[in-house]
Amino acid sequence: MKPEFAKYLQQDSILLLEGETKKQVFEDIVQHAATRCTMDEDQIRDAVWKRERMMTTGVGKGLALPHIRVNGFPSPLIIVGICKNPVADYKSLDNQPINLVVFLAADERDQEAYLKLLGSISSKVKEEGVIAEILTAGDDRAKIQEILSR
């Protein structure tokens, strides 16, 4: 069965992130997200950093799951970012550099759907070997989408 989030994952939202810092990586994600929704970069940036100040979204083992809920967000947005350079300043829970960022933005009115999506992302990327397989795929967006969709 396909993971719940896979229906929102599009190949053009799989990015090779060039940044070396959390701020640079977030900026690339924010810029891309703004092209995919009705919100502007400042609104998205503010929401991302507000969430990050509450608690790091670096969950460990090289994975970060930044996520925001925003009023009136048209449909869930998933962005997968492969870090070309491991992001050492992310301050993940295990203090390890981040190699993979999976960003979720969704409407705040449907918390149950939001949590279901976040849970499906987390379950998939925490499967044994998935992160390594994604990183090995490099910039092959079709392959990464296939890995995350199975």
Image (cartoon, grey):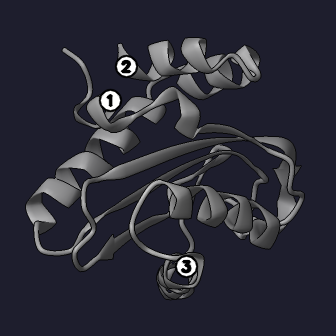
Element at label 3: helix
Q: Residues within 10 Å of mark 2 (few under 14, many from 20)?
A: some
Which amino acid type is shown beneath numbered disc 3?
Glu
Tell which of 123 and 100 is nearer to you: 100
Task: Give the left or right position of residue 104, taking residue 44 as reference.
Answer: left
Q: Which mark is residue 103?
A: none
Residue drawn at 18 percent across, 49 percent down? 116
Q: Is residue 92 something one can see in this rendering?
A: no
**Considering only order in the chain, which callout, 3 or 1, is on the residue closer to the N terminus?**
1
How many C-alpha atoms fall within 10 Å of the one at disc 3: few (<14), some, or many (≥20)?
some
* Secondary structure found at label 1: helix
Q: Is residue 109 left or right of residue 16?
A: left
Residue 27, image x and y in percent? Answer: 72, 68
Q: Earlier in the sequence, mark 1 or mark 2?
A: 1
Mark 3 or mark 2: which comes first in sequence? Answer: 3
Determine the residue positioned at 58% across, 79% down: 45
- Residue ID for mark 2: 149
Q: Amino acid at mark 2?
A: Ser
SS assignment at label 2? helix
| Residue at mark 1 | 6
Q: Amino acid at mark 1?
A: Ala
The CA span between labels 1 and 2 is: 5 Å
Q: Residue at x 74, y 17 (%)?
A: 136
